[in-house]
Image (tube, rainbow, N blue to C red):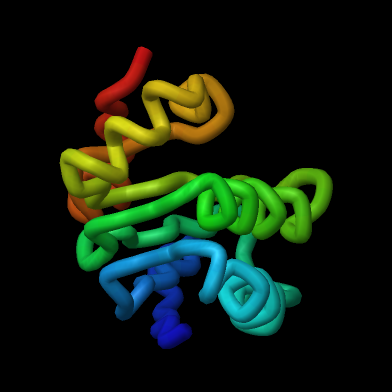
């Protein structure tokens, strides 16, 4: 699993450089997210713009990554492709995470969910 990370204005942006987050990648994703976000800023934006497919294992891995951040830290999701967005909405995970149409929207905090 390839993740890249930058920090700007007190926000860490983690980009997933893969087209899938599925059962084959979920464990590695969780480990990489933990290592990447450990001791970082209070807000983390996960850029999913390259992810075309996510299954229940991938969804669980993102939830686990949010929990790993701990109290007082927040994980927002940005750039969801239509299929990934659909999974988050069908599973009602859009009530758990703030979803943003693009990374730009997330950095300026323009919410797309209510």
| Residue 35 place in picture, x, y as percent | 68, 83
Q: Tell me which corner region of the image, top left, top right, bottom left or bottom right, holds residue 72.
A: top right
* In the depicted structure, whether residue 78 falls above or below residue 14: above
| Residue 90 place in picture, x, y as percent | 40, 22
Between residue 112 and residue 110, name the one nearer to us.
112
* In the depicted structure, whether residue 113 falls above or below residue 108: above
What residue do we see at 75% from left, 50% from top?
67
Asked whether, in this view, residue 88 is left or right of residue 56, the answer is left
User: The C terminus lies in which quarter of the figure?
Assistant: top left
* In the depicted structure, whether residue 36 falls above or below residue 105: below
What residue do we see at 27% from left, 70% from top?
19
What residue do we see at 41% from left, 68% from top?
13
| Residue 16 place in picture, x, y as percent | 37, 72
Q: Can you name the residue that lies furthest to the top here?
A: 114
* In the depicted structure, whether residue 43 falls above or below residue 25: above
The tally of labels here is 0
Asked whether, in this view, residue 10 is left or right of residue 16, the answer is right
What residue do we see at 23% from left, 42% from top?
83
Q: Tell me which corner region of the image, top left, top right, bottom left or bottom right, holds residue 40.
A: bottom right
Q: Can you name the residue that lies furthest to the front here?
A: 24
| Residue 27 place in picture, x, y as percent | 66, 73
């Amino acid at each position: 699993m390839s993740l890249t990370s930058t920090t700007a204005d007190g926000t860490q942006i983690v980009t997933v450089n893969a087209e899938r987050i599925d059962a084959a990648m979920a464990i590695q994703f969780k480990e990489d997210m933990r290592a990447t976000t450990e001791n970082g800023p209070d807000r983390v934006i996960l850029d999913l713009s390259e992810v075309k497919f996510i299954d229940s294992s991938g969804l669980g891995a993102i939830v686990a990554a949010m929990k790993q951040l701990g109290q007082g830290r927040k994980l927002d999701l940005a750039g969801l492709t239509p299929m990934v967005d659909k999974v988050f909405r069908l599973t009602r995970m859009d009530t758990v995470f703030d979803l943003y149409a693009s990374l730009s929207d997330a950095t300026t905090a323009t919410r797309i969910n209510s």
